[in-house]
Image (spheres, rainbow, N blue to C red):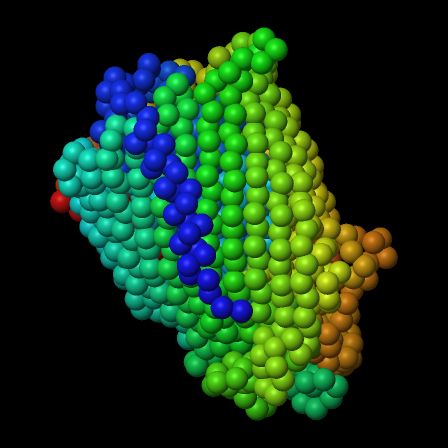
Amino acid sequence: MTRTTDTYTLLMLFPLTAVLAVAQGAPSDETAPSGQTVPVDQGPPPDTAAPAGRPASADVIEMEKFEVNDVPLDEQILPTVRPIGSVLGDDRNIIDTPRSVSSVNKAWMDERRVTNAMDFGQFSPGVYSSAQYGVPATPQIRGDLGELYINGQRIKYSRNSVLPSFNGVEAMDIIKGPGSAVYGPQGQGPGGYVNLVSKAPYFDAQHTTLTTTLGYWTSGRSYFNPEVQLDTGGPLGDKLAYRVSYLSRYGDGYYLNTDNETQDIYAALTWKPTDRLTIDWWGQYYKNDFNEIAGMNRVTQDLIDNGNYIAGPVTGGPWFGVLEGANAHTVKLHPWQALVSPDDYNESRRFQTQLIATADLGDDSKLVNRSYYEDRTSEKVSGYGYTEYVPTDYSFSNRTEWHTPGFTLFGTENKAITGVEFRYERLVSFQDFSQEPFFYYDLTQDPDTWAYPFTPPTGGGTPVPGHEKFGYNPWAGNGTQDSIIRDLAVFYQQDTRYTDELSSVLGIRLDHIWAAANSPKVIPSTDGAYYRSSGDEDNISYFASLIYKLTPNSSVYVTYNQVNAITGSANFGGVDGSAGDERLSDSLQAESVLYEAGYKTSLFNNTLYLSAAVFKQTRMRPQLVGPAARIRDYGLELEAVYQPNRKLTVNANLTWQDARQYGSGFYQQTGDYRDGYAPDIIVDGQPGTGVGSPNYATYVSPKGFIEAPGVPSVMANLFVQYEFDNHFGFGIGPQFQSRMNANAQGTLHIPNQVQVNGYVFYRGSKRWDVQVNVNNLLNDDLYDPIDVGFAGNDVVYHRPGLSTSITFRIHL
C-alpha cells in the first residue's frame, strides 16, 4: 500500500479550480450586503474569535442585533456574539442552532491555560475526559470518546498518542452528539466533537504578542517547565494578510521521570484577490516529547480513599507472581510517584494544513471548498511493558459546499447546502500490550527496576522489523494494522421557514466507504499473516430538527440524528478487520442515534445566556480487545453564561446522565484488582485471590450491561471572574464530579470530587499584563480513571496537588 500523491493533488485541485472559476465569473459588487457594517476588505478586530467552521476572514454574517455595553469584542464570553458554524455548516446564531453546543473564546482558553482534552469539561456540560495514561488527546462527551475538528473538517483520531496543539487555535465549540449532514459522522469518537477555530490573519494593523509562562511550583515537588509563545500578524497590502505563532516549551513534567517539551510553528495567510473571492490557508508543524503516565499501580479502594499503597516484592506464583503477606507493608505515596521508568519516552510529530476557498455568488449564495491534510507519527516506550510504533498515519479530505440562494417552495422560505466530500486515510501501526504486568512493580523501589523483566522488546510481543525496540501483539488485533479507507459522500441539507416562529432543518448524507485492512509485514511472516480483510458499505445518515422561536431571543427545538460511522482501533482509529470481512463490514457501519430537545434564551439585553437540553444517545464503541460495545446514555444538560459588564463574568453548567455499556463481555487485563495479592493479605476487608496478575480476563455482567465506568453521573462547574477599577482582578471556581466506577465490575470507584482552580491578574496597561494561575487550590487528593476498558483493575491516575504558574504577556 503506497501513497497516491498525484491522486491527492487532482482531487484537491479540481473542486478548488471550479470555485476559483465561478468566483472569477461572478459579477463584482463593491456595495456591502444589506446589514453588513464591516467593509469586505477589513479583517476582524485584534484577538477576536472567528466564526466556528471557517476562518474569520470570510464574509461577514448578519446576525440579530445583540449589544453589550462596555465590553470590548475580544473580551466577550457570551456565545450570542459569535456566529456558530460548527454544527450545521453555515453560520447562525446559537439561539437558532438546534443542538447542545458550548462556545469557548480565546480569552477563556488563555486565562484557564487549556493544554489538553481534560481541560474541556470546565466550559461545557456533558464533557469529562479521563487521564488516558496522562496523554488525553480526545475529549469524552456524553459518556463516550469524541473527536476533534478544525474549521469544520475532521482531524485524525488519536486517543492517547498525539496531543492536539492550541498554538494556532483562536476559539472552539463543543458539540454534543454526532455531526450534521455537512460535517458527517465522526467515526471513532461518536460521543460528540470539539471544533477548533484557527487563528486568522489581521487586516487592520500589525499585532504582536509575546507570552511567557514560568512554572511550576507544586506541593511537595516543584519543577521547571518554561513556555514562550510569539504571536504576530498583520496586512501585506490591502488584499493579503498573515499570521505566525511560534510556541516553545521545554523542561520536566510533574510526575517523576517525565518530560514535557514541544516545538510548534503555525502560519496562516488570507488572500482576497477580488471582492468575491477569499482564500484562507494555514499550516502547522509540531513535535512533542513527553511521557505516558501509567499512574499508581496496585490500585485498591483504600488507595483511592486514604492513600494507602501496599508495597513489597512480588514472589513466585501464577502468571507474574503474587505479593505474599510476609513481604507486604502499607505506605503513603506522593502524588508525583507514578509508574514511569527513567528510559520511558513518548514522541509524536504532526504536520497539518488546510486551504479554504470561498466564492461569493451573490444573492446570499456562495461556493466553498475545503481541503485538509495531516501527516503524523508516534513512538512510545513504557518500561512496564507497552510499546507503540506508528510510522505511517495520514489523511486527506476535500469538501465542496454550495450554499444556495433562498428559494420559495409551496409557500415556504428555504435555503440549502449541498455538496460532495472525499476522505482518504492511511494507517500502519504496531502496538504491543501483550504483557503489561503492572502489579509486578513496586513504586517504593528504585525506578530503574520499573522495567519489563524479560527480553526485548519492552512488551512481551514480537519485534517490529528494523525497529526491534518496538513490538507487536502476536495475534489478530486491530491495534496492529495496515489499512486504507476511502470515503466518498454526497449530502443535502435544507432549512425551511414555515412561519416567523416555526422552522426546520432536514438533511441526508450518503457515504460510500471502501476499506482494506491486514496485519503489517512482521518477522518472520509477510503482511496479512494474522488477518486480511476488505469490503465496502453504503451508509445513509438522516438528520432532522424542528425549531420554534418563542421570542426573537429564545427558542425551543427537537432533533433526531441517525448516522453510520467507522470504528477501528481504540487507540489509533483506522478500521477493524482483525476478525475478517464480517468484522470489517460491521466496523464500517457503526450506528449512532441521537434524540435531543432543548431550550435557549438570551436575557437582560444579551447579558445572560441560558440553555437546557435533554437527550438520549446510543452508539457503538470500539474495545481494545474484542468486538465493539454498545453505549446508551441519556441525561440533562444546563448551561448559563452571564456578563453584565467588562468587570464581571460568570459561567456555570450542570450535567446529569445515566450511561450504560451493553455487550457479551468486557475485557479486563486483570480480572479482579485483588488477584495480585496472596490470600493471607486482607485487601479492602477481603482476602486476596492469589490468582496472579495480569490474567487476561473478560467480565460478563449478569445483567447484560454495566454502568459505564469512568463516567460520572453528575458534573457541575462554576467560574466567576471579577476585575476591580484598579485593573487587578481574580477568577475562581469549583469543578465537581460525582462518584464513578473505576473498573468494569464496579468493585472500585472514585468518590465525589471537587477541584478548585483560580487566578489573579493585573491588566492596567495596554502594553502588558500578568497573571498567576493556581490549580487544585485546596491541594486535595484527586483521582481519575486511566483506561477502564483495559486496566481498570491495575492502575489509577492521581492528579497533581496544588500547582502554581505565572504568565507575562507583552503587546508590541
Question: Within the image, what quadrant is residue 569 found in?
Answer: bottom right
Total numbered badges shown on the rendered structure: 0
Q: Is residue 11 left or right of residue 559?
A: left
**Residue 668 shows in this picture:** yes
Q: Is residue 509 left or right of residue 68?
A: right
Above or below: residue 34 compared with residue 526? above
> Image point 48% across, 83% down: which residue?
467
Question: Within the image, what quadrant is residue 495 found in?
Answer: top right
- Residue 234 appears at what percent x and percent y? 18, 41
- Residue 664 appears at what percent x and percent y? 81, 59
Viewer-closest of 481 and 249: 481
- Residue 279 appears at what percent x and percent y? 31, 39
> Image point 25% across, 17% down: which residue?
31
Viewer-closest of 642 and 357: 357
**Residue 338 shows in this picture:** no
Question: Within the image, what quadrant is residue 604 found in?
Answer: top left
> Image point 51% across, 29% down: which residue?
417
Quadrant in which the C terminus appears: top left
- Residue 550 appears at what percent x and percent y? 56, 13
> Image point 53% across, 18% down: which residue?
414
Above or below: residue 39 compared with residue 253? above
Viewer-closest of 352 and 720: 352
Above or below: residue 673 compared with residue 646? below
